[in-house]
DNA sequence: GTGGTCTAGACCACG
DNA sequence: GTGGTCTAGACCACA
């Protein structure tokens, strides 16, 4: 489900945190979905349970997950973000988009290829019926 | 020249090592190019000189760089790197795409909206002849 | 410096987190001030170092503290908060003020007494030259 | 009637126990008053009935409440509580004051501004004859 | 010597 | 059985 690379110098908890954020952003995890229990995830990833718990706690503080005491951990609604104005959000997205296109260009990809990559990513999850 | 993010949980030396390898792989650094001195790089990145020295030493041992005493540090590899780089580049693009979608989601945008933004930006660039 | 009550059912890390926030809010800790090292604080409070480290990490994520790798942990500037509009902030403060007066009234204090309590708190730190 | 905050790290049962004790100490609950049934309270607070039952049982053992089988749960103490409450009230006010200052600081206000806001609110209330 | 990561394992709060 | 807290102790990254 989520993969952790022990040889990657990035801390385990940071890898998992990022993996969950990506899963939510790409729609592989949807609002209300339940995540594996802390202990189950720990077994799956061959990691200590505390490490997983830390990740869930941080993502809860960040508003991505929601934990219900004694029940489990769930994906939370997509925030809508702190009532920041429409314009500000739009401007921020524009910056991200430019950065993406520029960095892809540095790797030798055209804008079309960079966009195609995203489309593919998105179609993958839809054809999987997730 | 190289960018280091102090808030990224990835160790500084790993970030720098990766940045140099990418620069070599994409041709931004070519065989024989001289790198900044350890101390200059440390100042530029606001990092301890020991950290930079450690990176140079490891990359020298890996055959990527070459240190000539009293002269400087230079790029050694390149040939085989670029040949093997199709998969590398594809993987790097995939990482960028995931980052873009996730950060857009943090702003409250769906994947569809994030992609639409790119289409728009691309058209703007083209009509401006950029 | 900071006090933790082991009999209080509130988790130790939550108590410490709150104590630091209060110290910053009342001015007992000022921007740029250095906090005790993780291990020193742990000894002072007779608590495990991990517990203190967790608190520092959470307060860093919350923007209250700033840690410089290998150097120490410091109080950060007072945010100015996410560019939320002047009106919104003012309205939020107004809500807090009303709640404070109401809850103080529930305890049998007049508005004057409630305000006096804050004045006293503030003068204490100033006469201490902190 | 009683407020419980699921995001407060303090255990739910401790929050509820405290809330009832405060209600008794400030006279909002008086000797002989009947409390909601365990199940009703559980529904009101969106908490498990076991949690409420545990609180009632502990407060009964502490002499604050009294359970009459098949009838309900009633307030028992009060007398000594109110006598000893000067320090209690003062301490409670101090907690409220700290919370006010800290939350105001989170909004980017200084202690002085937070106090000024109270002065203003107070004058408004008085001129409105509230 | 500073903070950060990770593990192992005990015990608590909640449903 | 779920997540949360806390401890003890090892090792790493950084200055």
Image: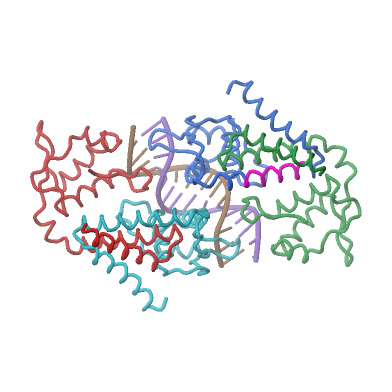
Chain colours: A cyan, B red, C blue, D green, E purple, F brown
> Is B30 in the magenta?
no
* Side of A26 where C129 appears, left or right: right
User: Up-down: is B27 above or below A123?
Assistant: above
Count the numbered circles shown. Answer: 0
Residue numbers of the magenta segment: C91-104
Q: Quadrant of residue D96?
A: top right
Image coordinates of residue C129 in percent, x first then y, are 59, 20
Image coordinates of residue B58 in percent, x first then y, are 20, 44
At horizontal 60% and vertical 41% (from top left) the residue drawn is C18
Q: Quadrant of residue D57?
A: bottom right
Dominant secondary structure of the residues highlighted in magenta in the image = helix
Is residue A94 or residue B8 the one in the foreground? A94
At horizontal 84% and vertical 37% (from top left) the residue drawn is D84
Is residue C92 or residue D1 the one in the foreground? C92
Is residue C59 or residue D69 the one in the foreground? C59
The quadrant of the image that shows the C terminus of chain B is bottom left
Image coordinates of residue C42 in percent, x first then y, are 53, 36
Image coordinates of residue D68 in percent, x first then y, are 89, 61
* Side of D1 where A103 appears, left or right: left
* Side of A99 where D59 appears, left or right: right
The quadrant of the image that shows the N terminus of chain B is top left
């Amino acid at each position: 489900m989520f993969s952790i690379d022990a040889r990657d110098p990035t801390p385990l908890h940071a890898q998992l945190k990022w993996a969950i954020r990506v899963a939510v952003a790409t729609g592989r995890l949807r609002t209300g979905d339940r995540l594996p229990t802390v202990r189950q995830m720990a077994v799956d990833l061959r990691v200590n349970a505390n490490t997983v718990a830390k990740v869930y706690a941080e993502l809860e503080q960040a508003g991505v997950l929601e934990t219900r005491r004694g029940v489990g951990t769930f994906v939370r609604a997509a925030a809508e973000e702190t009532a920041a104005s429409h314009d500000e959000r739009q401007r921020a997205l524009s910056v991200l988009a430019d950065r993406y296109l520029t960095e892809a260009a540095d790797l030798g990809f055209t804008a079309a290829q960079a966009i195609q990559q995203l489309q593919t990513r998105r179609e993958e999850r839809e054809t999987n019926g997730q």
